[in-house]
Amino acid sequence: MAANMNKLTVLSLAVMVALAGCSSDDNKNENNIIAVDNAIAVGSEQCINGGVETQVGADTNNNDVLDSDEVNSTNLVCNAPATSLTTEQLASLTSNTWFSEAQTKLGAAQTASSNIVTESGKAKNVILFVGDGMGISTITAARILAGQLEGEMGEDHQLSFETMPFSGFVKTYNVDAQTPDSAGTMTAMASGVKTDAGVIGIDEAVERGNCASGKGHELVTSLELAEIAGKATGIISTARITHATPAATYAKSAERNWEDISDMPESAATCEDIASQLVNFEANLEARFSGVDVDGIDVVMGGGRRHFLPKDAAFNSADAVSAVEGDRTDNRDLTAEWKTQYPNGTYVMDQTGFDAISDDATKVFGLFNESHMQYEADRANDVAGEPSLSQMTEKAINVLDNNEQGFFLTVESGRIDHAHHAGNAYNALNDTIELAKAVKVAMENTNPEETLIVVTADHSHVFTIAGYPKRGNPILGKVVAVGATEPSLAADDMPYTTVGYTNGGGFRNLGSETDADAGYAFAPVTGRVDLTDVDTTTPGFHQEALVPMGSETHAGEDVGVYAMGPGAHLVTGTNEQSFLFHVMDFAADFVKTADEKLAQ
């Protein structure tokens, strides 16, 4: 500024802004006329985007300053609205980690969109992961726990499947039930048709528990179509392999509980139990479709050995926990029958046997427990040892990948559901984390250009994340508010946990107990419990429940679905659960290829 620059009082401004008046001898002509430019700040009432006000007048007192009473004209020029921000103006954003991470994510999303394959039949392989009972709150809490176990605050962590480029929601209700069960939900995913609760592989015309009513209403599943199409097929579950979710891929049953013949009434004599259907899968499929020649399910691994063995102690396995392991009352040893059908196959029942499975095995049948397999946190306590879900997933992919036509694999983390039923968040979340590890194994051991991977749940649970805990507060801990160091107190002057259940058995303080089912040894707890001196982060802690019940229940809200690979772009929005079958069919052309095989 020149030495003779003065600040002017501009009376016309309702709000004074920093106006810098600029004048000099160069602006003064022979008639003593002075022109002064005053900068108007951004945000002023005159010019919201800033500008310049030019004042003109005669310097009548010859002091080289345009006094206010000498101004005889004013010209206001406002700046045009800015169409972009400068680097300096953006610095507070671009230097922020949240901003830069979102920009990176945006780039990845744009890449994923540009790589969408819109043609059907491009997926050589399809893998469906089902977290039984893995609702949105379970995923969120498991994400936080996984991060905290790695020394992070947790909230910004991501489980493996959360990095997939496409996601959406699925409506889980059964045809006859607002809040569903696993039989009806998995039937919808496996066959593309919704059905009633408690029914496996049969449409809604069936009357649950009525054997005859299911005849002629059997559905065709994606696993069966993959078999007919010549692909390798596999089923993995940490639950009994005859349990509702895995059974819906291969069995047809008017009652999910008909896991072996001892579970069936006399009126169901013309129906085949679920375990028998698994072993007879190849023969049953060939009988159902004339001219079909399939080679049977290539990989089966899970629990539920009792449903395959006679009710005779002579058939007990080395790790039997019951005096008589088998439940079958027809004296059939289905494991022996399977070995006869597949003499080159590999039957295993423990970790040692699993470790010995060759990657070039032709058939694998693993039954690792009398009932369900162990919770992941309790797996080390298994009598004979058993593989983890991620280990089974890797082994299955290695075996199935030998088929040049590709493969279809269903992987269920069945015990997320069981831990929630027991009201034990510790095991539910740890089994969810193990499912995420299994998904990561699949992502790392398949080609994303030829493999569709879908991750979802069959239903959710009444599991909540509540209170106002501060960032990084242990997800299994008591609520400690922002800025506080001691637990928050409820209206009853007692602390409370972040996670809890709407109903169920309620409070248990079993310390280091890693078997969630141990909680069933106690009656439901009614009312609140003082948790002041209780470590709620231990494996044996069972969260409080509002409504006392013998077992916590499923919930009815939508569940998430995540996908990557050919056809994954169809996983978006909110859809019926049966839609997922059609996504997988679009990706791999199951129906089209099977029809072509049948027509030959």
Image: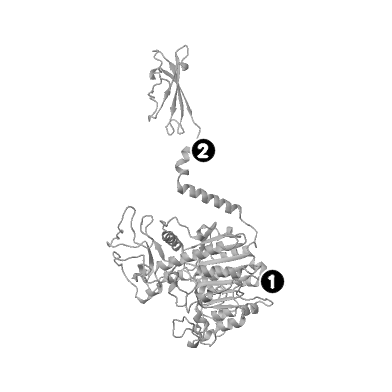
Look at the numbered discs 1 and 2 and tell me whether their residues touch, using CB distance below 8 Å. Answer: no
Q: Which residue is mark 1?
A: 597
Q: Which residue is mark 2?
A: 84
Residue found 58% across the figure and 77% down from its top: 346
| Residue 17, image x, y percentages | 39, 30
Quadrant of the rendered image containing residue 151: bottom left
Residue 134 visible? The answer is: no
Instruction: Give the Cα distance between marks 1 and 2.
Output: 60 Å
Three-letter amino acid code of the residue under disc 1: Lys
Could you tell which of marks 1 and 2 lies nearer the N-terminus?
A: 2
- Considering every residue shown, the one lying at the far left of the view is 493
Residue found 61% across the figure and 65% down from its top: 125
Quarter the N terminus occupies? top left
Say whether residue 400 is left or right of residue 555: right
Residue 255's place in the image compared with 577, above or below, is: below
Residue 101's place in the image compared with 513, above or below, is: above
Q: Residues within 10 Å of mark 1 (few under 14, many from 20)?
A: some
| Residue 412, image x, y percentages | 51, 69
Residue 55 visible? The answer is: yes
Residue 567's place in the image compared with 108, above or below, is: below
- Considering every residue shown, the one lying at the far right of the view is 600
Q: Nearer the viewer, residue 229 or 548?
A: 229
| Residue 274, image x, y percentages | 54, 79
Q: Nearer the viewer, residue 388 or 411?
A: 388
Three-letter amino acid code of the residue under disc 2: Ser
